[in-house]
Amino acid sequence: MNPIWGDIAGFFIIAMMLAFIGIWVWAWMPWHKRVFNDLARLPMEDDGANAIATEDKP
């Protein structure tokens, strides 16, 4: 096997680590908290229209 493959694999691993850390830092920025909280409450804000519609069916 060619020794260059070790360098390519090492570069790929470092690039993936940096991408992961970058996404993690982006997700934990303070200005995302409000949006994430709104998205977390979205399932609880159901108006019940689907539940009423399914109860009427035989």
Image (cartoon, grey):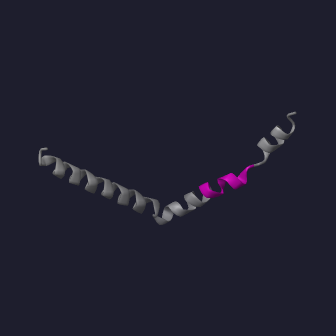
Q: Is residue 39 left or right of residue 2?
A: right
Q: Nearer the viewer, residue 38 or 40?
A: 40
- For the point 13% across and 44% down, the residue is 1
Image quadrant where residue 2 sits: top left
- For the point 68% across and 52% down, the residue is 43
- For the point 17% across and 51% down, the residue is 6
In the displayed image of the protein, which residue is found farthest to the left?
3
Image quadrant where residue 39 sits: bottom right
Q: Give the magenta-colored segment's residue range.
A: 39-46
- For the point 34% across and 55% down, the residue is 19
- Confirm whether the magenta stretch covers residue 26: no
Q: Is residue 38 left or right of residue 44?
A: left
Q: Nearer the viewer, residue 14 or 27?
A: 14
Which x, y percent locates residue 24? Answer: 42, 60
In the displayed image of the protein, which residue is found farthest to the top?
58
Asked if residue 30 is positioned above or below residue 4 in the image, the reply reads below
Which x, y percent locates residue 41? Answer: 65, 57
Which x, y percent locates residue 51? Answer: 80, 44
| Quarter of the figure with the C terminus | top right
- Confirm whether the magenta stretch covers residue 40: yes
Asked if residue 51 is positioned above or below residue 17 in the image, the reply reads above
Secondary structure character of the magenta stretch overall: helix
In the displayed image of the protein, which residue is found farthest to the front?
1
Q: Nearer the viewer, residue 13 or 30?
A: 13
Q: How many marks?
A: 0
Q: Is residue 11 left or right of residue 30?
A: left
